[in-house]
Amino acid sequence: MTLTGGCLCGALRFEIDGPVRIRGLCLCRTCQKVSGGAGNLFVGLEAAAFRYTRGEPRRFARADASDAPAREFCAECGVHVASRSPKAPGGLIVKVGALDDPGAFGKADMVFWTQEKQAFHHLPEDATIFERLPGR
């Protein structure tokens, strides 16, 4: 499966050439802040299946947490495109909104960090639900 995407202004473009391993929704407070409140819809894949075809992202990781993910975003328009976590060094998550065809996402099969969800968050039916990350 090949998917393409990019930021709002077009300075960053990417291509995914490999299988999507996870279709997820994260409702942790960090994802709520990054998204403006809605949580984070994402696809999880092997990092080797992803490459930037235009531009180079800026990266941000919280300095107060050694295992914080590095978020990749456009330096021009600020759109968050992807994240890489030291907890999953071979993996990568890509924000669904950055895909050229967000409909390729389908639906979230897993929902993470529901212990931090807000009353206005709705959980998808038939998804596997985790109060935290599995194993934490």
Image (spheres, rainbow, N blue to C red):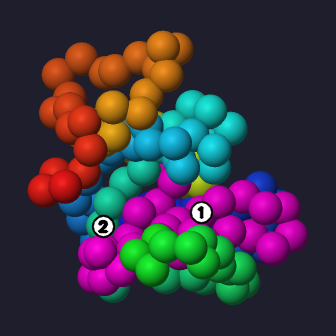
Q: Magenta part of the protein: which range?
A: 69-96
Q: Decide if residue 69 is in sight here.
A: yes
Q: Where residue 119 sits in the image (x, y, percent)?
A: 48, 14
Q: Amino acid at mark 2?
A: Leu
In the rendered image, the vertical position of residue 95 relative to residue 127, given as above or below: below
Do labels 2 and 1 touch, CB within 8 Å? no
Q: Residues within 10 Å of mark 1 (few under 14, many from 20)?
A: many
N-terminal-most mark, 2 or 1: 2
22 is within the stretch colored magenta: no
* Residue found 68% across the figure and 38% down from its top: 36
Q: Where residue 109 sits in the image (x, y, percent)?
A: 23, 37
93 is within the stretch colored magenta: yes
Q: Which residue is mark 2?
A: 45
User: Which SS class for mark 1?
Assistant: strand
Quarter of the rendering occupied by the N terminus? bottom left
Nearest the viewer among 42 and 86 is 86
User: Which SS class for mark 2?
Assistant: strand
Q: Please state if 77 lies on the left or on the right of 36 as rendered.
A: right
Q: Where residue 50 sits in the image (x, y, percent)?
A: 42, 77
Q: Please state if 124 lies on the left or on the right of 73 as rendered.
A: left
Nearest the viewer among 15 and 84 is 84
* Residue found 44% across the figure and 43% down from its top: 28
In the figure, residue 132 lies in which quadrant? top left
* C-alpha gap between disc 2 and disc 1: 14 Å
Q: Amino acid at mark 1?
A: Val
For this orientation, the residue located farthest to the right is 76
In the rendered image, the vertical position of residue 122 relative to residue 41, given as above or below: above
In the rendered image, the vertical position of residue 59 relative to residue 1, given as above or below: below
Q: Which residue is mark 1?
A: 81
* Residue found 65% across the figure and 60% down from its top: 80
Which disc is residue 61 wearing? none
Quarter of the rendering occupied by the C terminus? bottom left
